[in-house]
Image (tube, coloured by chain):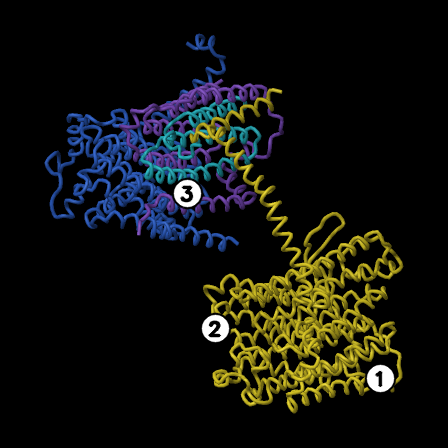
């Protein structure tokens, strides 16, 4: 084999190819693991949501499939896979197919740069935070294209609403994280976590409370969750941009949305809550906690944030569309800018 | 060898995608091809050790500018759009002129040799300092004034866009 | 130095604020900006005077105005004794007249505009006196001319006012043309337009001659006379005096400020400033002296018979300006400037009093319709009386000292025409007293000759107008005290102060001669007052009978020697004839219109053809552009 | 190592495809996209130069080009919207009021 290749290309290139091949194999394995685990978490996030909201509304939630309905997500998945795939006659077919893929993939790609625990990240790149912004802005394409290619008024309106909402809040979200970048001095997510660990409070959520607040609100809007779920407001738009989708294509939107939530929770855990670490003053007080693997702390933080998502959904009513835009442009962006100015000033003053 | 292969792939795809962008009848398709094109160009930038610019390319070009295009395209009456011809009557003239300039420029570039000595921003230097930091340092010191002007340009663009696109209320 | 910058630039700032914001924002409060600015200038000007008294003079460039080859002009300031005195005169008069104007212009619809122009005028005047080179002087010179034009034509909806403005502008052009030529000659001769090197080198050119219009002319005489052309125009001397009486169409404060106290004296200032040049040319000095003497006599005789209150004062101004030139012409520059300085106060005061009278008479200007105003407006009466005493040369008043010094220096000076101009000056002193008191007696004494309505309307002016009158009155009395001659036990401080700039005038004569000159001028003044009293109060029939007896002379005087008519016949009418028959009839109709109509027709025909190129398609243009780029690229790269 | 010339040729090709699109397409939005294509073509060569000359100035320039492109897109699309509102067409050849 090597000889055949060697006749076509230079022998040392073959070595390089083999070396690359092994690297690529490892990366592929990592990707597969991350996606599999993440999707499992996503599936159980839906289950957990129904349970949480059920109990909050004083009912039980899913209970039939498996013990306390534990197998419910799998049953749902199987059902969605075997449902009939209906495509509207006037739809723009290629784009109609493409839209859920874009949406889902852009959500999944973000997983690549998230450090789950010390040393474990699929791609440890220097501009991790920028990569997250890039990918989250891509989600808008999936939504717009889905809304437009369905050739349906409800879907189209939902798509437009969603796109303008996502674009507007992306600015606030980006700006809210600038404070973190300034404090950590890096865009690499692992570096941010390490810098955070060195910081006295161990979490940027405390000095960056303003940024954290803006980030949380923007995260809700970015993922089209209550109280900002205007794009899929069922009382107005049936189901918004994915009105015309069914079966597996619908499942991709559904999974994409929950992946998005998971990623937002992860970003907040990494950038504001200390990632896989816990503040030093806690470990100093209880040294035993050092033995607990970092992934546990990470998951606890992520699920706490997810719980907050559900809690808000069960509690708050939906905003009007103009109120949504007003909050984004007139409150969150100025607040985020203020946060940047204050952070920069404090950093200069403390340093010099 | 491998870099050349990579470059060959990207170059071929970028050219094909560019052609697709300017030749598709359906503007929405053009926008989607352009999205793909931007990703390839961003990858090419990564290839050239310009990771920050690559991220900006995706965030600003793909994430902001192209979404605006998509918005405007969606306002069009597509059914009518698909009925008419995509090129103007005198398209061969345009084709000839652009092809002729391209031929001349390519002919010149073929014999182009890089003569200037390398500057101080070597690959090692950038790796050491990270690209973002290197770019940021030079941007906020040497190019601070143009940077401020760029912010002013953006501000004016915001105001201008609002003024232009706002529906006039007839009193 | 930096403080002194405030002097001209405060009024400039006030002008800008008023002209930009006055119409819509300041409106009736526009005067505050201007008054504060000019008051600030005044304070700094006083500081400048104190500094120069301590012997500190300043000659500095502020910034380069333009540079072309070795021709360099900058905006710079020269503050020496002469400038300091001028600064005081300009800012004091300007400030008081600004205040006066608040009352006088109250309720006028162009209130803000008036104050804006006043401020602009003050700026230009200060630039003029503070210049350290001829070109900046020229800038100020033209600037004040422009403001004068604006302000004469302030009531632009009145035809006579706008005509008067145009007349002033055009007449001044004649003089300024000469002035401009003079500056060019200075540059050609000295290679610079800065005062300092020019005056320093002037002596070296004393015997040079230059070929001018085919004649060999004495260089310094030529330059001096060209500069004097400007002075003649600006200071309304014969034969370019015709604009000043007409300039009385402007608001009275303008007449007081521009056409009595400051702008018209710029000519005298110029001659004094250029004294190093003038002193080198006996001919030029003689011309200056004679022009001044003749003008003063000429204007004084006209002033005797006029009935318009402002015009009398205007002729009086021309006459007094002639006096100043007379002084300069006999080499007594400091005496001329001294008279300039005292004259500014009493003449401004006379104008403002006239304005006050007009205010009371609702715009009436005719002396014959007034009379007996004494009891209605005591403040105006007293201040005007004191101003008239001052101008008449009554001992103790400002006018006496300056006039006496001029006459003495004319009599005793080295000038060949000194005795002649002394004689004329003494006659003019008599005439001045006569017409000044004719004005006083006809206006304030006797019985009121106007309508009942007017009589009912009579009132004293408001405080804001009378207070400047009183302040100026102090100046009219006391300003001369700085120059009391040695003969009367004074120190002649003014002449001493001016010595570094203007030199010390030479006067050779005995004390008895000096007493004689003084006595003659005093007698002339008192006899003028006495004759006025006799003719216009005791025996009011005498003037009428005189007019009838010498009707020819009276007519000539009443018509101002027919100078206007002469100009009209010699210049205006031929110009109009040429314009009508040749320019309109031939050049315009046959030549210009043919071209004007022919070219569009040709272009129209041509455009009909080439407009086809304009397809209106964006991309056609873009393709053509790209083709152009293709051609350029091909030429550049494939060579 | 890929020669710089290849990048420059790629850049030239992308640029000229943009020019071609600008000169020939009817739809004003596609024309506008062609302009963006030209800008990207230029950006490629600037980044390549920057890399090969080991000088940051090229990237700074690209940074500013992207900024200006964003501003330009905002203004340009606003103009297109205003145009579309008045003429209800996006075809350049129907906008020929300036025909001579």
Q: Nearer the viewer, residue A268 or C315?
A: C315
Q: Earlier in the sequence, mark 2 or mark 1?
A: 2
Q: Are marks 1 and 3 in contact (CB under 8 Å)?
A: no
Disc 3/disc 2 C-alpha distance (Å): 73 Å
Residue C249, image quadrant: bottom right
Say which residue appears at 55% left-offset and 66% top-offset: C154
What subunit carries mark 1?
C
- Marks 1 and 3 belong to one chain: no
Q: Is residue C69 visible?
A: yes
Label 1 or label 3, whichever lies nearer to me, is 1
Label 3 or label 2, whichever lies nearer to me, is 2
- Residue furthest left in the image: A64
Please indicate whether residue A41 sits to the left or right of residue C117 in the image.
left
* Residue designated by label 2: C107
Q: Position of residue A134 (x, y in %)?
A: 38, 36
* Residue designated by label 3: A192
Q: Which chain is cyan?
A: D
Q: Which chain is purple?
A: B
- Residue furthest bottom in the image: C538
Residue C321, image quadrant: bottom right
Q: Nearer the viewer, residue B136 or C374?
A: C374
The quadrant of the picture occupied by the N terminus of chain C is: bottom right
Determine the secondary structure under disc 2: loop
Please indicate whether residue C192 sits to the left or right of residue A2 in the image.
right
* Residue designated by label 1: C514
Determine the secondary structure under disc 1: helix
- Marks 2 and 1 belong to one chain: yes
Q: Nearer the viewer, residue C162 or A264?
A: C162
Q: Which chain is yellow?
A: C
Q: Which chain is blue?
A: A
């Amino acid at each position: 084999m090597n000889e055949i290749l060697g006749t076509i290309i230079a022998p040392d290139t073959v070595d390089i190819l083999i070396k690359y091949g092994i690297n690529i194999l490892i990366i592929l394995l990592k990707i597969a693991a991350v996606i599999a685990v993440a999707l499992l978490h996503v599936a159980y996030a839906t289950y957990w949501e129904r349970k949480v909201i059920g109990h909050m509304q004083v009912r039980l939630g899913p209970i039939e499939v498996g013990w306390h309905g534990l197998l419910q997500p799998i049953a749902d998945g199987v059902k969605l896979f075997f449902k009939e795939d209906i495509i509207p006659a006037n739809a723009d077919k290629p784009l109609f197919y493409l839209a859920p893929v874009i949406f889902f993939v852009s959500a999944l790609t973000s997983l690549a740069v998230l450090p789950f625990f010390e040393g474990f990240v699929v791609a440890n790149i220097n501009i991790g935070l920028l990569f997250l912004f890039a990918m989250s802005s891509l989600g808008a394409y999936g939504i717009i294209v889905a809304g437009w290619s369905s050739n349906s008024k409800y879907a189209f309106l939902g798509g437009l609403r969603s796109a303008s909402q996502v674009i507007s809040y992306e600015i606030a979200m980006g700006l809210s994280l600038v404070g973190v970048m300034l404090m950590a001095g890096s865009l690499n997510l692992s570096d941010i976590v390490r810098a955070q660990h060195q910081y006295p409070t161990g979490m940027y959520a405390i000095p960056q409370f303003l940024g954290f607040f803006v980030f949380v609100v923007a995260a809700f809007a970015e993922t089209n969750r209550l109280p900002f779920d205007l794009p899929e407001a069922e009382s107005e738009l049936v189901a918004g941009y994915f009105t015309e989708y069914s079966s597996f294509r619908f499942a991709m939107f559904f999974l994409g949305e929950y992946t998005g939530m998971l990623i937002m929770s992860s970003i907040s855990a990494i950038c504001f809550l200390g990632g896989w670490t816990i503040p030093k003053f806690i470990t100093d007080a209880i040294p035993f906690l050092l033995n607990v693997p970092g992934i546990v702390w990470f998951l606890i933080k992520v699920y706490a944030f997810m719980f907050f998502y559900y809690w808000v959904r069960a509690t708050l009513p939906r905003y009007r569309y103009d109120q949504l835009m007003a909050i984004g442009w007139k409150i969150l962006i100025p607040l985020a800018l203020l946060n940047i100015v204050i952070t920069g000033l404090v950093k200069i003053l403390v340093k010099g | 060898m491998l870099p050349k292969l990579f470059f060959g792939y990207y170059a071929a795809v970028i050219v094909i995608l560019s052609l697709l962008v300017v030749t598709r009848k359906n503007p929405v398709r053009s926008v989607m091809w352009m999205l793909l094109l931007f990703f390839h160009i961003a990858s090419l930038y990564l290839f050239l050790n310009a990771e920050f610019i690559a991220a900006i390319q995706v965030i600003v070009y793909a994430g902001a500018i192209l979404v605006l295009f998509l918005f405007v395209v969606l306002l069009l009456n597509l059914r009518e759009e698909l009925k008419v011809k995509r090129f103007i009557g005198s398209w061969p003239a345009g084709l000839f002129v652009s092809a002729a300039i391209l031929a001349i420029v390519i002919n010149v570039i073929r014999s182009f040799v890089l003569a200037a000595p390398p500057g101080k921003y070597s690959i090692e230097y950038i790796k050491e300092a990270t690209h973002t930091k290197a770019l940021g340092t030079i941007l906020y010191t040497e190019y601070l004034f143009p940077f401020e002007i760029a912010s002013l340009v953006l501000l004016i663009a915001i105001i201008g866009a609002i003024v232009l696109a706002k529906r006039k209320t007839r009193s | 130095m930096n403080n002194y910058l405030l002097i001209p630039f405060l009024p400039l700032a006030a002008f800008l604020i008023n002209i930009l914001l006055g119409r819509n924002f300041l409106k009736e409060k526009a005067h505050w900006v201007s008054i504060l600015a000019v008051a600030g200038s005044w304070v700094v000007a006083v500081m400048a005077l104190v500094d120069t008294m301590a012997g500190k003079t300043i000659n500095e460039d502020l910034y380069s105005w333009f540079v072309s080859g070795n021709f360099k002009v900058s905006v710079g300031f020269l503050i020496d004794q002469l400038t300091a005195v001028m600064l005081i005169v300009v800012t004091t008069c300007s400030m008081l007249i600004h205040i006066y104007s608040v009352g006088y212009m109250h309720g006028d619809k162009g209130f803000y505009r008036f104050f804006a122009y006043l401020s602009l005028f003050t700026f230009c005047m200060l630039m003029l006196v503070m210049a350290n080179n001829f070109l900046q002087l020229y800038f100020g010179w033209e600037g004040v001319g422009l403001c004068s034009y604006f302000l004469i034509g302030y009531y632009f909806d009145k035809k006579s006012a706008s005509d008067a403005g145009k007349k002033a502008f055009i007449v001044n052009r004649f003089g300024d043309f000469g002035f401009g030529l003079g500056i060019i000659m200075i540059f050609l001769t000295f290679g610079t337009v800065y005062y300092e090197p020019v005056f320093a080198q002037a002596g070296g050119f004393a015997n040079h001659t230059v070929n001018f219009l085919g004649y060999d002319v004495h260089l310094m005489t030529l330059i001096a006379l060209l500069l004097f052309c400007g002075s003649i125009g600006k200071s309304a001397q014969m034969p370019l005096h015709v604009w000043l009486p007409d300039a009385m169409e402007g608001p009275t404060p303008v007449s007081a400020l521009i056409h009595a106290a400051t702008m018209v004296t710029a000519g005298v200032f110029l001659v004094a400033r250029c004294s190093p040049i003038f002193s080198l040319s006996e001919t030029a000095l003689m011309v200056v002296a004679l022009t001044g003497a003749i003008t003063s006599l000429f204007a004084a005789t006209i002033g005797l018979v006029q009935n318009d209150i402002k015009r009398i004062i205007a002729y009086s101004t021309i006459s007094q300006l002639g006096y100043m030139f007379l002084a300069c012409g006999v080499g007594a520059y400091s005496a001329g400037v001294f008279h300039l300085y005292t004259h500014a106060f009493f003449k401004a005061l006379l104008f403002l009093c006239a304005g006050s009278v007009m205010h009371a008479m609702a715009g009436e200007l005719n002396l014959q319709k007034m009379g007996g105003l004494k009891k209605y407006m005591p403040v105006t009466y007293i201040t005007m009386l004191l101003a008239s005493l001052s101008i008449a040369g009554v001992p103790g008043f400002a006018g006496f000292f300056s006039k006496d010094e001029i006459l003495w220096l004319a009599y005793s000076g080295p000038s060949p025409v000194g005795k002649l101009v002394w004689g004329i000056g003494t006659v003019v002193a008599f005439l001045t007293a006569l017409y000044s008191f004719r004005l006083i007696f006809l206006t304030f004494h006797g019985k009121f000759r106007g309508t009942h309505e007017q009589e009912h309307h009579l009132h004293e002016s408001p405080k804001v107008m009378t207070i400047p009158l009183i302040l100026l009155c102090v100046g009219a009395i006391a300003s001369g005290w700085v120059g009391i001659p040695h003969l009367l036990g004074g120190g002649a401080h003014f002449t001493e102060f001016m010595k570094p700039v203007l030199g010390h005038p030479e006067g050779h004569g005995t004390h008895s001669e000096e007493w004689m000159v003084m006595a003659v001028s005093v007698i002339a003044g008192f006899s003028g007052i006495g004759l006025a009293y006799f003719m216009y109060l005791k025996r009011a029939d005498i003037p009428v009978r005189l007019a009838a007896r010498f009707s020819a002379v009276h007519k000539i005087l009443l018509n101002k020697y027919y100078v206007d008519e002469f100009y009209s016949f010699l210049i205006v009418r031929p110009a109009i004839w040429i314009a009508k028959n040749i320019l309109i009839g031939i050049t315009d109709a046959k030549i210009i219109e043919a071209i004007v109509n022919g070219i569009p027709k040709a272009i129209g025909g041509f455009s009909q053809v080439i407009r086809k190129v304009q397809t209106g398609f964006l991309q056609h243009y873009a393709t053509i552009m790209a083709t152009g780029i293709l051609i350029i690229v091909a030429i550049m790269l494939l060579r | 190592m890929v020669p710089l010339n290849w990048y420059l040729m790629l850049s030239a090709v992308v640029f000229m495809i943009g020019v071609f699109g600008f000169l020939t397409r009817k739809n004003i939005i596609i024309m506008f996209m062609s302009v963006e294509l030209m800008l990207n073509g230029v950006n490629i060569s600037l980044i390549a130069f920057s890399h090969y000359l080991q000088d940051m100035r090229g990237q700074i320039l690209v940074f500013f080009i992207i900024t200006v492109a964003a501003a330009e897109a905002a203004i340009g699309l606003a103009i297109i919207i205003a145009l579309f509102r008045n003429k209800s067409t996006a075809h350049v050849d129907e906008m020929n009021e300036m025909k001579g």
